Image: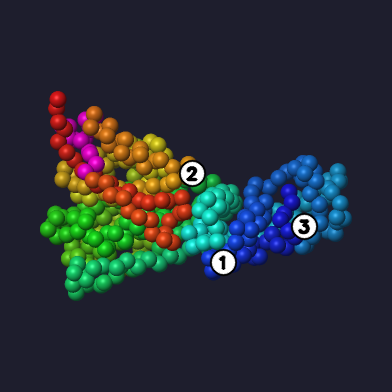
């Protein structure tokens, strides 16, 4: 296990600055990631040290008994010294916090690293993500508050739509690091598609029929895979600005850690009651594979919305069935999918179209004689500095009920 450069250069405190990402070089990032990978991956056994032949001099900067610069011997005391020294280094709380923040920033600002090619950026992001997952396997719940990232978002509202109301929507979110060994709780992070969708909702509410004329008197909106809650929070602040004060928003997700962070974000953005006596935003656990009708999902939704929630081949079918269970007869399901040009998520956007094409041949159990169908598809350009580098564009699906034709 040989660190790149000296041992002191391997510490998290010596990671290259990301304040000016456009100046960061490929060599700087590769060296830093290599060092972090060696430090925070699961520790090798003493046998691994012997096999590779790691010089003891590599751990000199750590306060340990003085040893020679030769290779590890068969002496058990030396074995313990090597293992203990590396464990002490890896478990240092200050180093852990710096490493987490640095890795998170690499992933969030990769698009701004203009000295790197797209392929190199993609590879480095994947590398950073894999290190972060392994690193967080050792993070305890007490660490999470210190390592969380606060992000502020501001979205403009057209003056013609917000007469006498705020011209901007401001949201502050807490993005938590991954918890423990469950790295599938991706909802702890705010992804590019939710930012794009929130911006579009504010700039063009009529595009989504978010008007008093189009919506019923007390609209119900359900977000699937709400994550940090950006879209739901945006809607909760946008609707009153559009003169719609009597509404219910239910932000749903499956992971309890995600829901806990979601509730905290709602509380921090609405320290006082929502405008209007009938406005309400709630959270709820929802498994797409087993949708339920318990409160607050006991009433059908006039609008269902979801952003970047398709990460497996079976997700599109599960979403279709879940939407069929929750959507009102005249309701609309808005689904924004990230179109990725490479990696394991490439091509998943096609599963959405395939799922709803198959609906034309199936009678969904919730609406006999009707089917959910894609009513329109719109391609949206990727915004500079938003989202991962593997995201090429976004595809917005408008989905609703149509009468089932009989042959």
The segment highlighted magenta reads 362-375
The answer to whether residue 227 is magenta is no
**Foreground tag (2 vs 3):** 2
For the point 24% across and 61% down, the residue is 204
Q: Earlier in the sequence, mark 1 or mark 3?
A: 1
For the point 68% across and 61% down, the residue is 11
Q: Residue 80: in sight, yes or no?
A: no
* Residue denoted by label 3: 59
Above-or-below relation of 44 to 370: below
Identify the element where label 2 is drawn. loop
Q: Earlier in the sequence, mark 1 or mark 2?
A: 1
* Residue denoted by label 1: 23
Q: 345 left or right of 17?
A: left
* Residue denoted by label 2: 343
Mark 1 to mark 3 CA distance (whole Å): 31 Å
In this view of the protein, which residue sits in the foreground, 255 or 32? 32
Question: What x and y, as percent, mark residue 188?
Answer: 44, 54
């Amino acid at each position: 296990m040989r660190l790149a450069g000296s041992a002191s250069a391997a510490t998290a405190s010596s990671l290259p600055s990301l304040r000016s990402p456009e100046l960061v070089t490929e060599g700087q990032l590769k060296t830093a990631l290599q060092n972090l990978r060696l430090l925070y991956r699961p520790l090798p056994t003493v046998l691994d040290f012997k096999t590779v032949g790691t010089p003891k001099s590599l751990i000199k900067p750590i306060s340990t008994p003085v040893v020679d610069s030769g290779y590890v011997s068969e002496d058990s005391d030396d074995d313990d010294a090597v293992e203990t020294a590396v464990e002490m280094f890896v478990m240092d709380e200050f180093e852990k916090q710096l490493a987490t923040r640095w890795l998170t920033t690499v992933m969030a600002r990769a698009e701004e690293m203009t000295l790197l090619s797209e392929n190199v950026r993609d590879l480095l992001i994947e590398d950073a993500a894999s290190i972060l997952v392994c690193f967080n396997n050792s993070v305890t719940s007490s660490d999470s508050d210190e390592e969380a990232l606060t992000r502020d978002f501001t979205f403009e509202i057209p003056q013609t739509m917000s007469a006498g109301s705020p011209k901007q929507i401001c949201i502050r979110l807490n993005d938590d690091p991954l918890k423990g060994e469950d790295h599938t709780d991706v909802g702890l992070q705010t992804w590019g598609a939710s930012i794009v969708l929130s911006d579009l909702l504010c700039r063009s509410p009529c595009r989504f029929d978010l008007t008093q004329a189009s919506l019923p008197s007390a609209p119900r909106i359900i977000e699937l895979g709400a994550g940090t809650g950006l879209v739901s929070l945006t809607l909760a602040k946008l609707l009153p600005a559009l003169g719609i004060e009597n509404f219910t928003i239910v932000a749903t997700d499956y992971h309890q850690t995600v829901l806990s962070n979601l509730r905290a974000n709602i509380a921090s953005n609405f320290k006082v009651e929502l405008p209007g006596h009938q406005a309400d935003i709630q959270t709820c656990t929802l498994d797409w594979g087993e949708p339920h009708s318990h409160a607050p999902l006991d009433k059908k939704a006039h609008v269902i919305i979801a952003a970047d929630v398709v990460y497996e081949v079976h997700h599109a079918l599960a979403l279709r069935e879940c939407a069929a269970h929750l959507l009102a007869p005249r309701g609309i399901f808005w689904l924004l999918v990230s179109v990725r040009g490479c990696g394991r998520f490439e091509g998943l956007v096609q599963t959405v179209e395939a799922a709803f094409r198959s609906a034309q041949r199936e009678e969904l159990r919730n609406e006999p004689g009707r089917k959910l169908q894609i009513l329109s598809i719109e391609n949206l350009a990727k915004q500079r500095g938003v989202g991962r580098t593997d995201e090429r564009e976004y595809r917005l699906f408008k989905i609703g009920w149509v009468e089932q034709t009989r042959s």
